[in-house]
Image: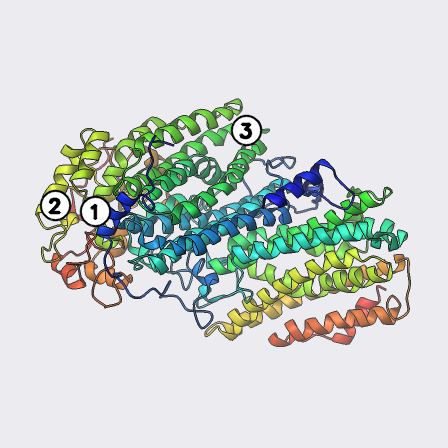
Amino acid sequence: MSTNIFTRGMVDPERQACIQEVVPKAPLETKRDHIPFAKRGWRRLTEYEAVMLHAQNSLDAVPGSQEVGEVVQKWPGGRPNYGVESTAALSSNWFHFRDPSKRWFMPYVKQKNEEGQTAERAMKSWAEGGDAEMMNAAWREHILARHYGAFVYNEYGLFSAHSTTVYGGLSDLIKTWIAEAAFDKNDAGQMIQMQRVLLSKVFPGFDADLAEAKQAWTEDKSWKPAREFVEHIWAETYDWVEQLWAIHAVYDHIFGQFVRREFFQRLGGIHGDTLTPFIQNQALTYHLQARDGVTALCFKFLIEDEPVYAQHNRRYLRAWTGRYLPQVGRALKAFLAIYKEVPVKIDGVTCREGVRASVERVVDDWAARFAEPINFKFNRAAFIDDVLSGY
Amino acid sequence: MSANMAVKQALKANPVPSSVDPQEVHKWLQDFTWDFKGKTAKYPTKYEMDVNTREQFKLTAKEYARMESIKEERQYGTLLDGLDRLDAGNKVHPKWGEVMKLVSNFLETGEYGAIAGSALLWDTAQSPEQRNGYLAQVIDEIRHVNQTAYVNYYYGKHYYDPAGHTNMRQLRAINPLYPGVKRAFGEGFLAGDAVESSINLQLVGEACFTNPLIVSLTEWAAANGDEITPTVFLSIETDELRHMANGYQTIVSIMNNPETMKYLQTDLDNAFWTQHKFLTPFVGVALEYGSKYKVEPWAKSWNRWVYEDWAGIWLGRLQQFGVKTPKCLPDAKKDAVWAHHDLALLALALWPLTGIRMELPDSLAMEWFEANYPGWYNHYGKIYEEWRAAGFEDPKSGFCGALWLMERGHGIFVDHASGLPFCPSLAKSSIKPRFTEYNGKRYAFAEPYGERQWLLEPERYEFQNFFEQFEGWELSDLVKAAGGVRSDGKTLIAQPHLRDTDMWTLDDLKRINLTIPDPMKILNWQPVAQ
């Protein structure tokens, strides 16, 4: 303390009496609408909007910004930050984007904390309640040790790819959504490793070390096209909307959904593994939130609600889809080779027709959700047949 | 919470195979990455960041969420339950309630800039642990934007004058002080080499200035009846230690390369100047001119936190790497005594553009200023007395401090390096005014530190200042265009007094008859002496 006697003005009667003498008898202003100049995303201003919308101090070169003139400090060479050239997508007002989940910091960490506590309890129950003993040993020692571990790198690489999308995002609510999606990716990778550490405690023969998993990710043919996609989107793709579309709307909604849901979650069940489906269920939830966010960004915001540039944006989304879909198809095709290594084979699930059904579920959902709204044409049968040739 | 902690401690003491401590996961993070062709940062640095650098606060995502959600529950519980029932919004002295319109919003700008600055480091760093730490900071900074915004939002709902709290994100566009915020926080944190941004944000902004800013500010707030700000700002401060550690690890990560020192000292010197140039005067104005009840003089707080704690102890830890204290530190020490008084004079002269209600120091305040800053009265006090006599507060007077200054040849210029206004002929801080011409345009600089930055990289600081942007605008038109009018359509949000009577309107402002000039065109411009 800088003074020996400190008086708190709110609770000190003498000081508070003096303060009340200068407080006006009636409010000086009757209107209490927060950020009244801003467009409301819903009927009334939400807390999500109140605590972030228009916090960005950008200039009117970024449409929707509140300031004029120029930024005071630029990059060496003179390039300004918040440059619209960071993406080929165009918007009449970058501040009209809203995350349908309305997640600002407080609800975001509250939800993640609840998921963390649920996971802790589930892991304890799994380890102590007898579930662990049901797990197929070969599934554990080979699939979880090698390939589930390899998926850590998938999640970490996608997390890494989000750094420049957070930097490039052209408004406050866009940056918020991207940062949360990135944090979820980091979390998803860490949760896989948390599960692997638990496995190493429960089963003395299981090694939590990632060397074998890294070898699978960097050397196995079954992961090669996926790894190449992740490396490209992380290090070589500079347009932040393109990155977000490619990651969440193309790659993760086809390849990611298949690996998490159709492979690890579904096949975990038939191998007596009740833990992996639980952990992956959280990652699937994160993807669904990212899916809804990228839908809001690319469809609602950049097309449906965009009065000027909708057609321009639709063309870019189609072009980006055309650029990344073949690689995603190759990733899925290569991944299907893993079915040969699956210890327990069950008709209708791991057989060719069962896998076809899985691929069709994923591809058809993707087509309905992301291809049709932008009139992206692709040969469904040929795409699925090509993917299945990897089985 | 304590039960939760007890469980944690028990598990740590007696680990069972059914639980996984977050540290058991974190220790694998360095293995999460792999090498591949083309793996480089999209925003490369002139430094070399070591891939083996570790982070000090080893948090996993879930553990981070557990910790932060507890803090959020405490903070919003206090605000929305305890302080609501105590009617806290109406217990604040108006001087303080007004200055918080600016403080909270300006700090919000800093927190927002820090989101992108941390993302830049997350891209540039190659160590997975460092990236994990920088990501946590990105999310922290979103938290801090939400929190600082919530202070304005809370005041807007509960305080007796919500105007300004509700729309400062719009009003700040015409505030002549705001470009100074943008230079230090808005862009200093994010527009440039990632390590340079880290030095600005973490090594100087956070390690040096958050203690005097947040700790001092909360003390002054509480003294003036504001328990809202301490509730939020002290919760912010709990994250800052991790950010300071991130900054320290940034330096650790680059020190293996002997070439580093070619850049580091210069970047540190520039970063300290950049952050100090705004923060030292602005925080001093907020504390001492935005308060009725005084606490410790800003110059003393600054000396303890900046000079002794940061420059002495904190930078002392970096001496092993050859880092020295910034060259401008002695001048900054002088600024800590006088720069905020210089800035307060200009803020009062330009009050219609600030978006808040403010008043001239009364006799008690003048006594305090003179007692703690000997010589204050003769330099500033007499001017304020003359302004008061000339009708500073009277809406019918047509008086404006800015015109008073200009009519007496005291030009207000904008320092082209910091973006802040300064008055060469009245300043008592360590300024050494410089005026120069480049490509046919005239520039003003408060002193050579900023001028040197500009001379080395003029393209980085090529911008229109406040006077250039709004030259030719009639004052009341500008205030109206920026949303500076209350819901009756005529009364100004900003006022030169705190009463609820005699409030200035657009017509009163028009009576001043002030059209924004560009002082570089009309006042006594002097070329740089060769």
Question: Which element carries disc 2, helix, strand or loop?
Answer: helix
Question: Which element carries disc 1, helix, strand or loop?
Answer: helix
| Type of amino acid under label 2 | Trp
Check whether the beta carbons of the residues at disc 1 and disc 2 lie within 8 A of each other. yes
Question: Which element carries disc 3, helix, strand or loop?
Answer: helix
Q: Residue at x 18, y 38 (%)?
A: B364
Q: Residue at x 59, y 38 (%)?
A: B57
Question: Which of the marked residues, 1 or 3, is nearer the chain's N terminus?
Answer: 3
Residue A15, x across and y down, in percent: 27, 44
Residue A82, x across and y down, in percent: 45, 55
Question: Which of the marked residues, 1 or 2, is nearer the chain's N terminus?
Answer: 1
> Mark 2, chain letter?
B
Q: CA distance from mark 1 to mark 3?
A: 48 Å
Residue A72, x across and y down, in percent: 36, 48
Q: CA distance from mark 2 to mark 3?
A: 56 Å
Residue A79 lies left or right of residue B359; in this view the side is right
Residue occupied by mark 2: B387
Q: Which residue, as the protein is rendered here, is positioned at the far front? A: A13
Q: CA distance from mark 1 to mark 2?
A: 10 Å
| Type of amino acid under label 3 | Glu
Residue occupied by mark 1: B348
> Mark 1, chain letter?
B
